[in-house]
Image: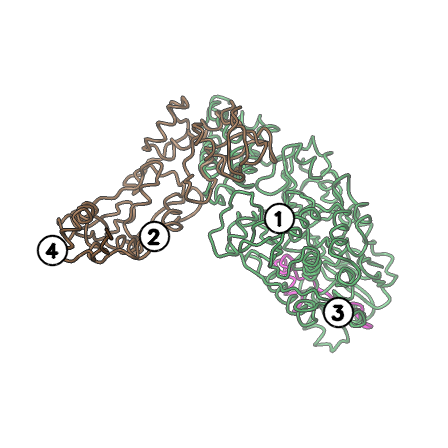
């Protein structure tokens, strides 16, 4: 493939993405399918066929508004793209009839999108009209959001590389390979200030350099897609809605680091993500974007996919490497870090899915552009899965540094049935519970740590006044206890005893001494565990003890 | 050579040497259960915590995974470290209530009892002494090359035994597992002509009988392994002798030489 071929592919993709006849596209990520999207798709297909209508029916990923699913995009040439929500099979007839007449059913319309900016390519102009339908930017759920990682999600067909070309796909790779040295690529990523989105927040460009400077015949890069936090599905949607963005990010990273082989490690519980990534890799290979001499340069790269076997701890990088090597998924002490001794003993760079997806836009728009988004030392956006006792649940992308309040009240519209929100839990099972009184806290790596929680991979679980915080803490300790690999004693034994004490507390039989022991043990586990899982596992207990001690006290023997 | 400072004492060390080894050589007794010099550091028991005061990564870390480097300065018994060790000892006392070495360490640290629920399993093959340090698994797999035992399950449900809790012919009966076990959890018993690995699903290994004195002296598969891997040059006639008889045989080689021709004649010394 060369530049002309890339341009031609874009034109071909644009004809699919913006055809000269109506296009009906159903949001079919796992969430959309679960909400009945596949039945809607089948009903639409039948309705179009039965009437012999001249219109396209397509599958797209998910725009992230989980509560309103199934979502259907209607594109009529010259008109704005209209997103229909809560569509059922019964609506199919009405939809195709309206579309055939150049209209959309108003009662199903959520919003209209006149133009969409894919950031790395030319804007998509859908058209104008339908002024009575609210504009995308006026929808409270979308208004505070800034889509960078999810810019294509819900608009393009994730199973068609042509549509990725249409939104400027693989142009950043072309730029990196033909105009930039590997050092310049790393400098650009360093300038962007991008930090690892898997949770630890380590500067990505610096991390790449660690592997780059190692002298070795072979180096690897790995995409960590072993997303396992309860209630978190950022990476799943990133893979299901825009798999090529991950591939492009990895290709650019491999070029910068000097790796010729890469592996995407996906949990087996994500079959659709695996299918779409596999298809994306086949398409990329067919277009010469994987394999030898990519874009006619000296750069060659092979990518494979490895499936996880269900252990949460395999998201930890040394356990992940052990798992790929066919060993039991147990972490090992670092150093040596994977950058020195990783997969098969070779220098290895591991980044989370979302980290990789940020790379193409950084190369296309420049590190400075990226650094202008977000907050001090916390540049760019972060995708959160907003779930729990909040009205509007869904996948939300906002600049780093956005206050918790914005997420919970502006995007999420507060509690269900007018109930008061009590706390949010960020960062997955080893995150902390942050009380409503601290909702002005900016969501960035440092501020979340300061209040006793973590950024983690981006799970945000909202709890309202009906939620028992002791019960919440018990749930998360139950989870980490079950997922502890059992290698080091504090995590294996300590979490077991924490769980026993919490059960005692919940049964109303605990004493003050039990509570003190729980707190002391939490500190021990945090300070002495081998890996990140154990070191952060007590956070739900420590934060609920800090902010909601009264709920613990109320359960103690003799408290009533 | 480089110099590290442990508890204020300058100690000579090889660059990259394990700090725990350096400390022990200097007579500083840092407790550790999962460390064995012949194996790679594992970092699981967390007992050997030290505080790095000066070095690349200041803070509390395990000395079995810490490498000696110039200017490295550590403390091995700060109040915080002692507190953490005591807490870990309490966890071990609850996990392995019959382990004498844990009780001894508890006495050394002034831990009188554990505040955690003690786990006592009836008919535990590891005698309620196992703390899952993994030394047996690693020595069996990495040094003996047998891999007869491994972890079963995960997390708090982790156990160590043979696959499917069945007798395992991969076991050579060498007993290296019992030798390295820091808590004496592994039981084996020699019953006349058979070694019974009581902890490992009663795996039975035949014992070799000395051709000279008739005592049963070592497991047959282990002697075979030793002859093949460790001493391939050993004379056939010595293979069936117990260590005592082999010594005697060597001492009486002249007699053996004369009477039975066991040892080949040595070249005659020139006067």
- Residue A222 sits in quarter: bottom right
Give the extent of the magenta segment. A16-44
Element type where label 3 sits in the image: helix
Image location (x, y in percent) of residue B146: 35, 53
CA gap, disc 3 to disc 4?
107 Å
Q: Residue at x 87, y 66 (%)?
A: A78
CA gap, disc 4 to disc 1?
82 Å
For disc 1, the neighbor class at 10 Å (few under 14, some 14 to 19, many from 20) is many
Image location (x, y in percent) of residue B207: 20, 51
Name the residue that disc number 1 marks. A232
Chain B color in figure: brown
Q: Nearer the viewer, mark 2 or mark 3?
A: 2
Q: Residue at x 13, y 48 (%)?
A: B213
Name the residue that disc number 2 marks. B148
CA gap, disc 3 to disc 1?
35 Å
Q: Which is more toward the observer, A21 or A92?
A: A21
Q: Please give the chain letter of the residue carrying mark 2.
A: B
Name the residue that disc number 4 marks. B259
Coloration mode: by chain
Q: Please give the chain letter of the residue carrying mark 3.
A: A
Farthest residue, direction front? B271
Asked if the residue at tag 1 contacts the one at tag 4, i.e. Cβ–Cβ closer than 8 Å, the answer is no
| Disc number for residue A96 | 3
Q: Which is more toward the observer, A240 or B26?
A: B26
For disc 2, the neighbor class at 10 Å (few under 14, some 14 to 19, many from 20) is many
Which of marks 1 and 3 precedes in the sequence? 3
Farthest residue, direction bottom? A52
Image location (x, y in percent) of residue A440: 74, 34
Asked if the residue at tag 1 contacts the one at tag 3, i.e. Cβ–Cβ closer than 8 Å, the answer is no
């Amino acid at each position: 493939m060369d530049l002309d071929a890339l341009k031609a592919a874009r034109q071909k993709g644009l004809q699919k993405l913006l055809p000269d006849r109506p296009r009906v596209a159903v949001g079919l990520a796992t969430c959309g399918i679960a909400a009945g999207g596949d039945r809607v798709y089948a009903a639409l297909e039948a309705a179009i066929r039965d009437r012999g209508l001249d219109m396209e029916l397509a599958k797209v990923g998910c725009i992230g508004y989980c509560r309103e699913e199934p979502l259907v995009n209607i594109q009529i040439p010259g008109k704005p793209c209209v997103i229909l929500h809560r569509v059922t099979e019964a609506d199919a007839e009405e939809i195709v009839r309206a579309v055939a007449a150049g209209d959309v059913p108003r009662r199903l319309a959520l919003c209209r999108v006149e133009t969409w900016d894919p950031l790395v390519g030319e804007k998509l102009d859908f058209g104008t009209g339908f002024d009575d339908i609210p504009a995308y930017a006026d929808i409270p759920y979308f208004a505070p959001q800034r889509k960078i990682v999810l810019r294509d999600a819900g608009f393009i067909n994730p199973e068609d590389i042509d549509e990725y070309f249409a939104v400027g796909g693989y142009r950043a790779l072309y730029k990196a390979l033909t105009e930039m040295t590997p050092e310049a690529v790393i400098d650009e990523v360093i300038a962007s200030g991008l930090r690892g989105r898997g949770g630890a927040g380590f500067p990505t460009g610096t991390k790449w350099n660690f592997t780059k400077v190692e002298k070795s015949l072979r180096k690897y890069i790995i995409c960590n897609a072993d997303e396992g936090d309860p209630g978190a599905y950022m990476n799943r949607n990133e893979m299901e809605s825009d798999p090529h963005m991950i591939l492009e990010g990895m290709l650019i990273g491999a070029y910068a680091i000097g790796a010729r082989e890469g592996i995407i490690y996906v949990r087996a519980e994500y079959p659709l993500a695996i299918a779409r990534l596999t298809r994306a890799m086949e398409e990329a290979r067919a277009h010469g974007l994987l394999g030898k001499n990519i874009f006619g340069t000296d750069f060659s790269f092979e990518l494979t996919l490895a499936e996880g076997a269900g252990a949460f701890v395999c998201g930890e990088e040394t356990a992940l490497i052990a798992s790929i090597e066919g060993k039991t998924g147990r972490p090992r002490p670092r150093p040596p870090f994977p950058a020195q001794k990783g997969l098969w003993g070779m220098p290895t760079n591991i980044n989370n899915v979302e980290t990789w997806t940020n790379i193409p836009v950084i190369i296309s728009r420049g590190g400075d552009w990226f650094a202008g988004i977000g907050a001090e030392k916390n540049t760019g956006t972060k995708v959160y899965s907003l779930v729990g006792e909040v009205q509007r649940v869904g996948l939300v992308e906002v600049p780093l540094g956005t206050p918790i309040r914005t997420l919970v009240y502006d995007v999420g519209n507060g509690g269900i049935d007018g109930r008061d929100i009590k706390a949010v839990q960020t960062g997955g099972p080893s995150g902390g519970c942050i009380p409503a009184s601290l909702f002005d806290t900016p969501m960035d790596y440092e501020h979340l740590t300061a209040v006793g929680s973590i950024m983690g991979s981006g799970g945000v679980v909202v709890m309202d006044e009906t939620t028992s915080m002791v019960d919440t803490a018990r749930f998360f300790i139950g989870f980490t206890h079950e997922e502890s690999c059992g290698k080091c004693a504090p995590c294996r034994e300590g979490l077991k005893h924490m769980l026993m004490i919490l059960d005692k507390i919940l049964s109303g039989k605990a004493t003050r001494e039990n509570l003190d022991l729980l707190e002391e043990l939490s500190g021990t586990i945090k300070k002495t565990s081998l890996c990140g899982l154990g070191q952060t596992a007590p956070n739900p207990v420590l934060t609920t003890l800090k902010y909601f001690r009264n709920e613990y006290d109320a359960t103690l023997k003799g408290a009533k | 050579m480089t110099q590290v400072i442990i508890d204020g004492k300058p100690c000579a060390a090889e660059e990259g040497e394990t700090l725990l080894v350096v400390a022990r050589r200097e007579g500083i007794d840092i407790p550790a259960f999962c460390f064995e010099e012949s194996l790679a550091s594992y970092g699981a028991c967390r007992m050997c915590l030290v505080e790095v005061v000066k070095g690349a990564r200041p803070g509390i870390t395990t000395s079995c995974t810490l490498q000696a480097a110039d200017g490295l300065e550590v403390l091995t018994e700060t109040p915080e470290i002692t507190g953490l060790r005591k807490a870990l000892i309490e966890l071990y006392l609850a996990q392995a209530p019959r382990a004498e070495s844990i009780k001894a360490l508890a006495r050394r640290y002034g831990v009188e009892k554990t505040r955690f629920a003690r786990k006592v399993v009836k008919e535990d093959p590891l005698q309620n002494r196992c703390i899952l340090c993994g030394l047996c698994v690693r020595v069996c797999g990495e040094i003996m090359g047998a891999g007869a035992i491994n972890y079963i399950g995960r997390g708090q449900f982790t156990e160590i035994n043979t696959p499917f809790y069945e007798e395992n012919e991969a076991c050579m009966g060498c007993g290296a597992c019992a030798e390295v076990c820091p808590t004496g959890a592994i039981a084996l018993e020699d019953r006349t002509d058979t070694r019974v690995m009581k902890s490992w699903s009663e795996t039975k290994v035949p014992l070799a009988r000395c051709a000279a004195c008739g005592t049963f002296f070592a497991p047959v598969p282990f002697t075979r392994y030793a002859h093949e891997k460790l001493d391939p040059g050993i004379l056939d006639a010595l293979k069936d002798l117990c260590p005592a008889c082999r010594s005697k045989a060597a001492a009486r080689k002249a007699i053996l030489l004369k009477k039975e021709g066991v040892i080949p004649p040595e070249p005659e010394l020139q006067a």
